[in-house]
Amino acid sequence: MTLSTMILKMCEGLGSTCAIFFLTLLFSLPLGMLFALLRMSKNKVVSSVMRFIISVLRGTPLMLQLLAVTYGPHYLINDLGVARNKLIPVVIAFAINYAAYFAEIYRGGIDSMPVGQYEAAGVLGYTKIQTFMRIILPQVVKRIMPSITNEVVTLVKDTSIAFCVSYEELFTIGKQIANSQTSFTPFLIAGIFYFVFNGLVDVVMGRIEKRMDYYQ
Amino acid sequence: MNVLEIKNVKKSFNDSQLHVLKDISLTVAQGEVVAIIGPSGSGKSTLLRCATLLTQMDSGDLLYSGDYAARNNDQGVSVYADKQQLKKIRSRFGLVFQNFNLFPHFSVLKNLTDAPIHVLGRSKEEAEKKAMSLLEKMGLADKADAYPCQLSGGQQQRVAIARALAMEPEILFFDEPTSALDPELTGEILKVIRQLAEEHMTMVIVTHEMSFARDVADRVIFMDGGVIVEQGDPKEVISNPKEERTRQFLSRFAQN
């Protein structure tokens, strides 16, 4: 197999990798906010339950969670079978796992806001929801952007974990070629793909951070 | 009609261990300028925070223009009015903080127009027109598009005063408005407050600027240990205090 056929074959997996990446971000960024708000709930039961869930999600391997979501239903309910489209369980597992990390980032950002901002908004008559949406959240987003970038970079590389449920993304295909051709080259190609992908992530996130640079 | 009436307010912190306000009453008439002085920890700021609904009173009544924000029940515990009523009452007062608390992600103009638009339901044109005239009055018309971090402390505090005025309050509270400023910037804030006093804006000012309190206020209140020790005509209270505690406090300023 020539180098160009290898690259071409692996490019087919790139679409699936992108699908995991973008769908995970699409669902985990808002889900993380929900987790964070529940985690910060004044209701002790709610916040304790959420804290436990987050610690399990962050304290166990993503690969294990991925296997559990993909094959768990089959073992729990007899002969249910495994989802034909693996993208669904993969995105569910990734989105929930990343939501846990985003939740802690959001919480840190919200906690770091000076109480004076809440008080100023309160005296001006903003409702609690208005205060959060108009005053707090926009400032939190700016503060947490570097940490979010960090997670996004990790996510690019983590998409390769989907190989463990044989979802046909970039790394899975690379591994298949590597096995059949007894060659290490596909792994090198995969490495370059991820590196270039993260180069793009850096550029995009850098632009977003720069756009929020108009105040300190 | 009294713009503000506070009756027998009591407030303690740390499970009733620390009594910060011990039965304080304060009435402010329309157009009156009241200065509150006293050592730190005397309860001045807590009184202001109770009046502006940032802190809940344990006991006591709070009225704005005769409308109850909170009143004592039979057990002598403050019960606050419902959300709707409190919203109405919040629109009657403004508060200027010691450290400005401007919204850093909004331009100066947006700091002044966002609440009028989204809280009072004013149109954008109306809010911006009002904001520009206030900025002009503060000598900051050229800073409308700037962000708070680009301004000096004195300019930020003037924006904060304008932001409060943009809500057209009946009464304006100041919580040590010059304490976070360099001495050379203090003057520009005092000038603005003086100008507001000449326009008969009703104001309650917690301050450490004694000569300013004497010149601008209609009445000075000296607080210490959670009670009002002495109050009255500024020249009397500051230049010729009756109470020993007031004399002791003021003598520390005279030395400077």
Image: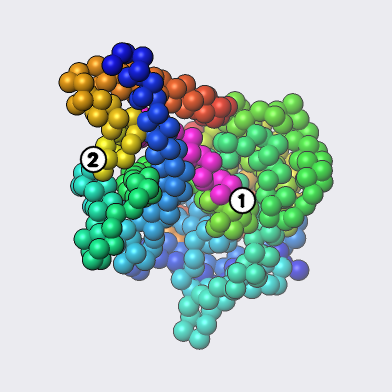
- Viewer-proximal residue, B21 or A178? A178
Residue that appears at 48% across and 39% down: A141
Residue that appears at 43% across and 32% down: A15
Q: Quadrant of the N terminus of chain B?
A: bottom right
Callout 1 amino acid: Leu
Callout 2 amino acid: Cys
Scheme by which the image is coloured: rainbow
Give the answer, above or below, for where B48 lies relative to B146: below
Helix, strand or loop for disc 2: helix
Q: Position of residue B39 (x, y in %)?
A: 45, 49
Helix, strand or loop for disc 1: strand
Chain of the residue where label 1 is placed in the rendered structure: B
- The magenta stretch is A133-155
Residue that appears at 36% across and 14% down: A4
* Badge 1 and badge 2 in a common chain: no
The circle drawn on residue A164 is 2
Assess whether residue B60 is covered by the magenta stretch: no
